[in-house]
Structures are given as structure tokens and as C-alpha cells.
Amino acid sequence: MEFRKSRPIYLQIADMVCEQVVSGKLGADDRVPSVRDLGASMGVNPNTVMRTMEYLQREEIVYSRRGMGFFVSDGASQRVHDLQRRRFLDEELPLFVRQMRTLGLSWAEVEKAGETVVTDLGAQEVDPESQVPSTHKPAATELQP
């Protein structure tokens, strides 16, 4: 795995584990590869992987069975989704808005470009819990940076 310098390695490993949970490759009560195996396969110190597992435990995505390793928690997929939403809103969106301001982009330009991206990706259903239909056009007051 090639790591980015902009994000701590233990969090990038956590992202990889979370991706496997969301994709269904790891389900509830499935054993996560051992700390040593993950460390060896990724070329990182097992202490870094252990830090990943401690983080995932705090987020209740995995749990530990003494002497057996780490396992995926029941409901982990929803918690990963919630964690990713929180990260996007707290970390990525502010960076995006700062970059918009730096480049002098208006919300209208971003919205137009966003519509093109959505079209290129194909229409995707929006999670009904978000209560934001795919045709939702935010009011100008909703888009103020």
C-alpha cells in the first residue's frame, strides 16, 4: 500500500479496514487480519497497526477477543458510514471551501461542475435517511461559505 503524507498512516490503514467493512468483505464478527500480518503485508511497524486497531475499537468498528485478535463489531458498517460523514463535514468540506475561496470560484460554478460530475458518474440514489433528494437544489443561503 502506498501511503499519503497528508494523513497519518494508522488512519490510512483504518480507512482500508473500513472500506472492507462497508464493501461487505468483512462482516459482523469476521476476524480482521492479525496485527502482525497487516503490518508485514503493508510494510509498517506492528505498533502502527495496533494504533489503528485501538482507534477502530474507540469508534466501535472492531472489538478484541483476548488471545484471538480483532473482530468486526455488529453495526460496524453504519458506524463507518457515520464516521466518514463526520470526517467529510469536519475535515474535507472546510478544505474544499477554502480552496474555492482561494481560486475565486462561486457556488454557481461549483454547482454546475458538480452536476457534470454527477452526470458523468451516473445517477445514484441518495440515502433516504439523508432526506436530500437527488434533485435537491440548495437555496443560496444554504451555500454561503
Image (spheres, rainbow, N blue to C red):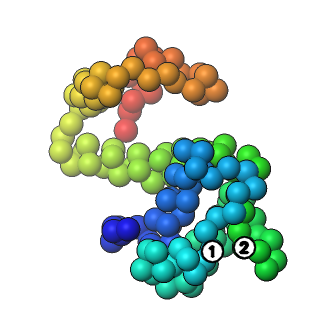
The location of residue 14, given as percent across then percent down, is: 54, 63
Where is 92 relative to 7, above or below? above
**Dot label at residue 139:** none
**Dot label at residue 34:** 1
Residue with the most extreme right position: 66
Where is 123 relative to 28, above or below? above
Nearer-the-camera pick, 75 or 93: 75
Quadrant location, the N terminus: bottom left
Residue positioned 30% across, 21% down in the render:
119
CB atoms of marks 1 and 2 within 8 Å: yes
Q: Which residue is the site of mark 2?
A: 69
Q: Is residue 39 left or right of residue 61?
A: left
Label 1, secondary structure: give it: loop
Nearer-the-camera pick, 98 or 72: 72
Residue positioned 48% across, 80% down in the render:
40
Quadrant location, the C terminus: top left
Q: Is residue 103 left or right of residue 143?
A: left
Category of crowding for the residue at label 1, using alpha-carbon neighbours closer than 10 angstroms: few (below 14), some (14–19), many (at least 20): some
What is the distance, in whole Å, between disc 1 and disc 2 at their CAs? 6 Å
* Res 104 → quadrant: top left
Q: Is residue 52 left or right of residue 105?
A: right
The location of residue 106, given as percent across then percent down, is: 24, 32
Q: Is residue 50 left or right of residue 16?
A: right
The location of residue 89, given as percent across then percent down, is: 49, 45
Residue positioned 81% across, 77% down in the render:
66
* Res 44 → quadrant: bottom left
Residue positioned 79% across, 80% down in the render:
67
Amino acid at pointer 1: Ser
Amino acid at pointer 2: Gly
Residue with the most extreme left position: 103
Is residue 139 among the parts visible in the rendering? Answer: no
The location of residue 45, given as percent across then percent down, is: 49, 85
